[in-house]
Image (spheres, grey):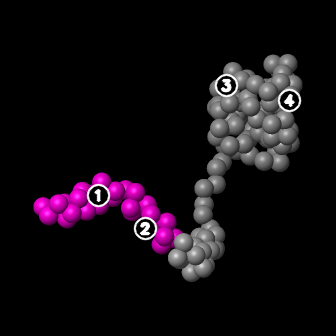
Amino acid sequence: MEFGARLKEIRTSLNCSQKELSEQTGLTLRTIQRIENNEVKPSLYSLKVIGEVLKTDLSKFVKTAEAKPYEFNLTLKITDMNQFLNDLKVLIKTHWKTILLIVFIVYLFTSYTDIKSGIMDAWTGK
């Protein structure tokens, strides 16, 4: 039995509609529907709030004897990273003056007291 079917079974056994579950969890009705139809894998946050509302241990959601454990894929594709770096290069190349100005302004704000005391010392001849 897939995750969505297990969720629906638990929800219906507690006489809870999708709309009620949506209202109690703060998730949209469409999100609940997509999870139950196995269109998406729920996030950890969604699992947590659904488990709290249904007063169900998350182990029921994660593992059963007949289904695979719930998996999270945290791989980062090299092509995605290369695209990010290329986009970053283009951003810096096209907007380097603006970025430099922002860095300079941030430096001035963070060093204001040191700059002020240096100017005051120079002004008074200390």
How would you rate the neighbour count of disc 4 (Cα within 10 Å): few for under 14, some for 14-19, many for 20 or more? some
Q: Where residue 73 appears, x then y in whole percent?
A: 64, 54
How would you rate the neighbour count of disc 2 (Cα within 10 Å): few for under 14, some for 14-19, many for 20 or more? few
Q: In this view, does 54 lie to the left or right of 122?
A: right
Task: Write down the residue under mark 4.
Answer: 18
Which mark is drawn over residue 116? 1
Marks 1 and 3 sit apart, C-alpha to C-alpha, by 55 Å
How would you rate the neighbour count of disc 3 (Cα within 10 Å): few for under 14, some for 14-19, many for 20 or more? some
Q: Which of 63 and 91 is in front in this view?
A: 91
Instruction: Kindly identify the residue that appears in the image at 64 percent across and 70 percent down.
Output: 80
Q: In the rendered view, tell whether residue 11 sits above or below residue 34.
A: above
Name the amino acid, label 2: Phe
Task: Write down the residue under mark 3.
Answer: 52
> Earlier along the polypeptide chain: callout 3 or callout 4?
4
* Residue 113 is inside the magenta segment: yes
Secondary-structure class at tag 4: helix
Q: Give the range drawn in magenta.
A: 99-126
Secondary-structure class at tag 1: helix
Marks 3 and 2 sit apart, C-alpha to C-alpha, by 48 Å
Q: In which quarter of the image is the N terminus?
A: top right
How would you rate the neighbour count of disc 1 (Cα within 10 Å): few for under 14, some for 14-19, many for 20 or more? few
Marks 1 and 4 sit apart, C-alpha to C-alpha, by 62 Å
Name the amino acid, label 4: Gln
> Earlier along the polypeptide chain: callout 2 or callout 1?
2
Instruction: Kindly identify the residue that appears in the image at 84 percent across and 43 percent down.
Output: 34
Mark 4 and mark 3 in contact (Cβ < 8 Å)? no
